[in-house]
Every structure is written in structure tokens, then in C-alpha cells.
Image (spheres, helix red, strand yellow):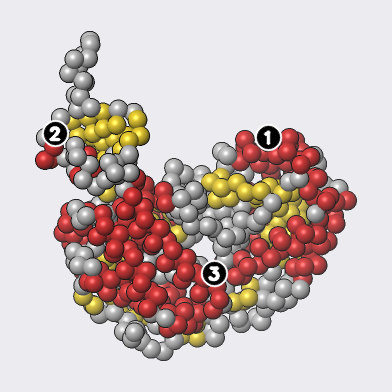
Amino acid sequence: MQITGEMLIGHAAVRGTGGTQRAFNPALNAEISAPVFGLGTHAEVERAAQLATAAFDPYRSLPLARRAEFLEAIADEILALGDELIYRAHAESGLPLARLTGERGRTMGQLRLFAQVVRDGHFLGATVDTAQPERQPLPRPDLRLVKVPLGPVAVFGASNFPLAFSVAGGDTASALAAGAPVIVKAHSAHLGTSELVGRAVQKAARRTAMPEGAFSLLIGAGREIGEALVAHPAIKAVGFTGSRQGGLALVNIANGRHEPIPVYAEMSSINPVFVLPSALAARTDAIAQGFVESLVLCAGQFCTNPGLVLAVDGPDLDRFIASAGKALASKAPQVMLTPGIASAYRKGREQVQAVPGVETVASGAAAEAESHAAQAALYVTDARNLLGHDALQAEMFGPASLIVKARDLQELLQVAEHLEGQLTATLQIDEPDLAAARKLVRVLERKCGRILANGFPTGVEVSHAMVHGGPFPATSNAAHTSVGATAIDRFLRPVCYQDLPDALRPQALQQDNPLSIWRLIDGMPTRPRGI
């Protein structure tokens, strides 16, 4: 499929007139000469918003099976792009081909998971409280609840996942599954990749006869297009993955609107790893090796990167530090996604190094001065220092981590209480550690969205039970996940229908249950007939 440099608005391809931009190859530190991408203006935002508004009612009213077919068709069309997609994503991101192939599989898996979610109808939350006209002292009316989509959704592509968190990624899949049209703002770091995937979505929309405006893709440099999109009254929710600064900027715009809207922003996390004493003594080298491999994976450019390790000071921790330092020192520099990310990573390391009481344990092989490659780094400090310097909780977003020495388990708990909100927290534990771990878990439940044991946080399974979210600043809304089946709930709201005639009720609430879905009737889960 040819990359043209055009935006995709509804069923049309549109050349932007707001300037031009070329894609960039971070491995070669050079622009990709062709094609030249045309940048959008407020006019394209307005056109996409108008089409999304017009498409909203027809799209959400389609039979659930049609909506599911659309999601599956997107997955099929992405696969049909073949190696062209993988090679283009590699050229624009520097990510390994194998990693991108796996990410494509995850992207397709997400789409198919949400197709399943749509088909089973459980996401609707269909609930019926039947009328009780004879009830005393007051009768009860007929009450029926179902969830409906919020309206058109703006999605921002993420830099570190050009497929799975981008044009047809999790935010787009869950919004389309909810019945919400989507307008994507392509990430400037993978323009060609975005167009290829956008054309796959557009082709799937045509193939399944979706209303024009169910999907659009905009291109814009800087903040102008994104800010205009979030401010537009047609947009009813926002999905974002990126920096804390970028996420908060969108939150402020959304909150300043005449009608404030939710922004589901994944922003910043250092994902603490707590290594408890028995596990530390018994599995020192294994934990150290696993930690370093997780830390440097894809140049540390994961939002679940283990940026903090905490343990009780002593000979076992000294052995751990030595083992991790030796493993990290052998790591070669890796190309980062963009020059901006590489620069931010270097500044983040400098800020940590500048804090008194922080020592450098080890560094990986040095990167060339003019490259955008990241040098791995490992630092150590004590718990009192961490408690006294907020800078040590800042995300470095790269292959660098800080080991923190606590005097005892009580100080470890104190540090856990002090930490900001996180996407994940990890416990390295053996049987004798369970009593201490139990206390930690109570704290970590308040601090993060996912708690794992005897593993490492990089790698997020796409499933029904997964939670990828957490308290601020991990996300702007801790009540929801951006990964997993329940991500659909971000783009839904409940509506109650009281005493409406059956013909006016949504199908999910009609007396004969034409959708054949499970419903909660008078407080009892009720299977559809024939099941």
C-alpha cells in the first residue's frame, strides 16, 4: 500500500495545507525523504468532528454483530498490510522487527478481544427491576438500565507503541467497541506507520459499510491540532498515552470547556520493585539478572519499566547491587524512539545524578555523542534520601533505575506510603516473606493498578482481568484501565428508562431480550433463553 502523506477524514483522503513534515529515522538520525506529509488545520478538525457527530447515532445503533465485524475487519486489514507495515514501523521507531511483529499481533488481538466483548453484550450492563404496583407503602415503577456510548472520542497515538497504542490500538478499539466514533491524532514519530494503519481502518469501514465519520485520522505538528480536537464540542472523551506534561495540558483544556469531558491519560510511572529479605537471600543473582533484562528491554521505553528497586540494606543487597551492576555494564546502547525522548532521558539521568547521596553503581556501554541511543545506568541511594527528594521519583523513561536501601522493613513500608501513584508494583517474595508482603500489599493497593509477584512488570497481557492504570500521576483517572476488556467502560455511561413502552426501549432491555444477552433481573443474573 502506497504512503501518500495524506490525512484520512471519513471515507476521503485529504492533503493538509497547514505546512509539511517528513518522517524521521532515529537509527540513521535522518529524515525519510518521501513522502512529504501535509499538516492539518482547524478546518480538518472541524470536518472530522462534523462527520463523527453525524455518524454517532447511526454507528451506535448498528447491531452488535455488525460492530464486532468492523473490529475484526480492522484486524484482518492490518494483517493484510504484511511486512510493509513492520518495516515502516522499524524505520520510524528503531524498534526491533521481532518486537514490532509481536506488537502487531497484540494489536490484532486487542481488536478481536473487543469484538468478543461486543458480541457477548455483557458490557451493556443490562439491568431490569420489574414493576411492583402492589408494593407497600409505595409501588415500584418499571426500571431498566443500560450503558450507552459517550459520543465521539479523540485518541492520541503514543510514541513507544506505534501499533498497539496508536491508530488502531487499545483506545481506538475500546472506543469503537463502545459505539463511539474515533478521531485519531497521529503521533509525529510514526507518520507513515499511522497512515498505513489508518488506511487499513478506512478500508475495513468501507468493507463493513460503517457510517462515514466512524473513523478519521489527522496529522499535525506541535500542539495546535491536538488542542483544537480536545476543545471541540463534538468530542466527548479523550484517550492519551504520553508525558505528564502533555497529559495535564489536555486535562486542563478538557476541564476548561463549557462542557468538561473525561481525559483518560496514561502519563508517568516508575513501577517500584520490592525485594523482600528471604527472596533476596535465596535468589540474589536470578532476581538481579531478571531485573536488568526488564530494565533495558527496548531501551527502557516502556511505561511499566522498573525504575525503582527497594530492599533492606545488608550483605544480600550488596551482592544484588554487584550482580545487577555487572549485568548492566555489558549492555550496549540502544536507539531511542525520537531525538526528544533521547534528550529527555539524558536530562532525567542528570537530575538524578545531581541529587546529593546518589551514587552511580554501573553504566552500560557509552553511546556515540551524536546518536539518539541510550546508555543504561544504575544508581543507588538510601530511603531517607528518597523521602527527602521528590526528584528521585521522576520517571527517566529509559534504561535507568535507582536502587534504594532501607534500614528495615518498617522503613520499606514508609517508602511505599510515600510513593506517588503507579501503574505497577512488584514483590519478589519467598514463603518467609509473606507476613511482611501482606502489609505491603495493603499499601500498594492504594498506590497502583497492578501488583505482581516474582516477575517483572514489563509485558502487559491483553485480557479480561488486566488493569493498566493507577492513581495520579500514573493516570489522570484511576477508576479505569486502558488495557483489557473493561477499558470499554471509559467510553460508556448508564441511562435508566422508567416505565417506557417496550417499543421505545433499547434492544438490550426489551422484554423478549432480542440480543440474547445475560441480564440482571430483579437482582438475579438471568441467562437468555436457549442457553
- The residue that disc 2 covers is 500
- The residue that disc 1 covers is 439
**Mark 1, secondary structure of its residue:** helix
Image quadrant assignment for residue 351: bottom right
Q: Nearer the viewer, residue 290 or 139?
A: 139
Residue 280 sits above or below residue 369 on the image: above
What residue is drawn where x is 81% and y is 45%? 278
Observer able to see residue 56? no
330 sits left or right of 476 in the view: right
Labels 1 & 3 near each other (Cβ < 8 A):
no
Question: x%, y% of residue 485?
Answer: 42, 51
Q: Earlier in the sequence, mark 3 or mark 2?
A: 3
Question: x%, y% of residue 416?
Answer: 66, 41
What residue is drawn where x is 84% and y is 50%? 281
Q: Earlier in the sequence, mark 1 or mark 2?
A: 1
Looking at numbered disc 1 in the image, what kind of residue is underneath it?
Answer: Lys
Residue 371 sits above or below residue 324 on the image: below
* Residue projecting furthest to the right: 315
Looking at numbered disc 2 in the image, what kind of residue is underneath it?
Answer: Leu
What is the number of the mark on residue 341?
Answer: 3
Q: CA distance from mark 1 to mark 3?
A: 37 Å
Q: CA distance from mark 3 to mark 2?
A: 55 Å
Q: Nearer the viewer, mark 3 or mark 2?
A: 2
Question: x%, y% of residue 422?
Answer: 56, 48
**Mark 2, secondary structure of its residue:** loop
Q: Nearer the viewer, mark 1 or mark 2?
A: 2
What residue is drawn where x is 46% and y is 85%? 31
Residue 252 sits above or below residue 91 on the image: above
What residue is drawn where x is 56% and y is 47%? 450
Looking at numbered disc 3 in the image, what kind of residue is underneath it?
Answer: Ile
